[in-house]
Amino acid sequence: MLYEKVKQTAEFISARVALKPETGIILGTGLGGLVEKIADKVVLDYSDIPGFPVSTVEGHSGRLIFGKLSSRSVAAMQGRFHYYEGYDAETVAFPVRVMKELGVKRLFVSNASGGLNPSYSVGTLMVIEDHINLIPNPLIGKNDERFGVRFPDMRHAYDPALIELAFEVAESCSIALERGVYVATAGPTFETPAEYRFFRIIGGDAVGMSTVPEVIVARHSGLPVFGISIVTDLGVEGKIFSITHEEVQREGAKAEAKMTALISEMLSRIN
């Protein structure tokens, strides 16, 4: 059963890592460099962790890293899993349940995304205020009350207090931020022009192929979530050009320093 699998995985990790993480961080495509700022690292490869899937996507290193960031204890996923890799949504979000079992009290998630809002440009940092989920829900199936309630409330999928803290930090650090709605699709194809138009019509500001399954499971588990997207390409009419995964990685890396500074300073200010 899932509950026993989560406990076994957490016990395996706890036997090898003395640090008790307070914050979980999931790093998306091209954003794994934040781990270089983590001190006193203990690194576990996903392939060595029982029950963990293995990332198959370039730009996702496949390592779970424990240590200190801004003097706060963290568990950082350098690379995530995706529905399009062939994993079901429950498996994609499995590490979130493990982090919760390890004692994590909040979750930070990041991703590379396509910009839908005409005011965005490549390199824009968008704080996720809400999402539209077009990926199968990871909570489908019998509910285990030990994880959470059958019908979790998603009114505040992204924590308002963490969002406001992000903007306070951004102002003091001169980092430009936007607020927006993230649309999650199954992938792995990039969107057609008609799909971009549709996602904008239904209320999206950015679109990507990840994040939401993890956020749903985090909220099911009672974890507050902060999410941020780096816009690496544009899905705005007249600005849609051919895009490759390598280009997404490059643009993500360019904006990574700002995202790293933002998250590091947010952690230092959390009570």
Image (cartoon, rainbow, N blue to C red):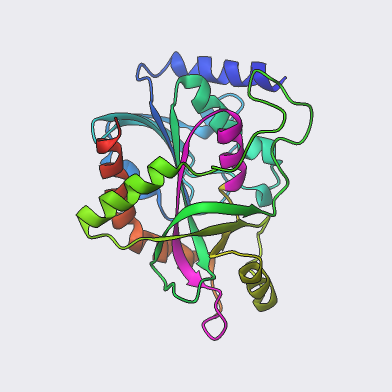
Q: At 47% across and 50% down in the image, what residue appears?
A: 28
Quadrant assignment for the N terminus: top right
Seen in the picture, residue 52 relative to 128 is either above or below; the reply is above
Seen in the picture, residue 13 relative to 139 is either above or below; the reply is above
**Picture coordinates of residue 191, whole percent (x, y):** 64, 69
* Residue at the right extreme, as displayed: 141
**Picture coordinates of residue 145, whole percent (x, y):** 69, 20
Q: At 25% across and 36% down in the image, what residue appears?
A: 268
Q: At 51% across and 25% down in the image, what residue appears?
A: 100
* Total marks placed: 0
Towards the viewer: 265 or 162: 162
Quadrant assignment for the C terminus: top left
**Picture coordinates of residue 212, whole percent (x, y):** 59, 47
Seen in the picture, residue 36 relative to 59 is either above or below; the reply is above
Q: Is residue 29 visible?
A: no
Q: At 26% across and 49% down in the image, what residue appears?
A: 169
Left or right placement of residue 224 versus residue 19 in this view: right
Q: Is residue 11 visible?
A: yes
**Picture coordinates of residue 25, whole percent (x, y):** 42, 39
Towards the viewer: 244 or 6: 6
Left or right placement of residue 227 versus residue 153 in this view: left
Magenta segment: does it hold 202? Answer: no
Magenta stretch bounds = 212-240
